[in-house]
Image (cartoon, rainbow, N blue to C red):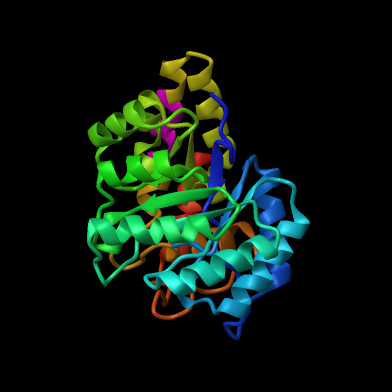
Amino acid sequence: MSARFGRVIPAMVTPFGEDGSLDVDASVELAKWLIAQGSEGLVLTGTTGEGPTITDNEDWELWRAVSEAVTVPVIAGTTTNDTAHSIEQTIKAEEMGCDGILAVTPYYNRPSQAGLFEHFRAVAQNTSLPVILYDIPVRSGRKIDSEVLLRLATETSNIVAVKDAAGNPAETAKVIRDAPAGFEVYSGDDGLTLPLLALGAVGVISVAAHWCAGEHVAMFDAWEAGDAALAQKINTKLLESFDFESGDDAPNPVPTKAMLRTIGLRVGEPRLPMGPTPEGLEDRAREVYARLKK
């Protein structure tokens, strides 16, 4: 099954300089490196990309620079908990040359399901770009009900996919069963990617793919070739990387930036409030990476 945006899509971290400013050159360098490792698409300014702490002007600069530098699909995280602002940013993403947008559930203000429907529809109606809904109730505080998700997929032609980080594979299976032809599900939880593939998902928007895109591609290739045992073996090898992604003392993207620094990439530290990096995290990153690459 082909995936519109690619099968393995890192939710790219956003590199910052020592002074905390956006490092556009390092961002382009990182994007190209991720593609060289096997990534088939990129998401910018999402959760892992520290979207909430990036200014609108920085968004625009980053979206344009990366879109102009790569040939894989570039998906911009454009939405917030303000519908009008989300529309403005979505329009800008199209102007900057992005190939799609990622629309997260409005967070903190906990809208009704009717409000969610109208929010997502309004965003989609103001762009010709394809829209991926991002369902992540653990962060947003609100689950997109399956009925609302399916109605959006059916009634709004450019809502074409969902990044599923809701953690309920049984419900995801029903969405895949009932969705219109062409609607795609991408795993939004690395640990559930292989189970969701078994249900009909087409790809993953990933954190760990920053340092193990090749292993992800191999897992997808094995699954698509009918070799479930090999796919399971690769997934088992990736479990430690999935566990490393986030924790109470080092929430995402703190571990990913630590990992990339140990590999030698210029990504800087996360902006507050996500930092600082705990002592010993880079040593743990080296250990995780060494075991992965044995």
Residue at left offset 53%, top offset 64%: 45
Q: Is residue 76 magenta?
A: no
Q: Is residue 279 visible?
A: no
Tell me if residue 238 is in the magenta stretch: yes
Does residue 167 sit above or below 270 in this rendering?
Answer: above
Magenta region: 232-239
**Position above or below: 205 against 59:** above
| Chief SS of the magenta region | helix
Which residue does the image show at 42% across and 25% down from the upper left?
233
Q: Residue at x 62, y 79 (%)?
A: 57
Residue 163 x, y percent position in the rendering: 42, 46
In the rendered view, would you say 104 is above or below 226? below
Q: Total of numbered circles in the picture?
A: 0
Between 141 and 182, the one nearer to me in the picture: 182
Placement of 204 over or under 249, stated as above or below = above
Furthest toward the bottom, the residue is: 19
Q: Is residue 55 left or right of residue 30?
A: left
At 54% from the left and 61% from the top, the residue drawn is 126
Q: Which of the two residues, 102 or 43, is positioned nearer the viewer here?
A: 102
Which image quadrant is residue 240 in? top left
The answer to whether one can see residue 274 in this image is: yes
How far across and down, in percent of the image, does residue 294 sit? 53, 36
Percent from the top left, x then y, of residue 264? 65, 61
Q: Quadrant of residue 6?
A: top right
Q: Position of residue 235 (x, y in %)?
A: 42, 32
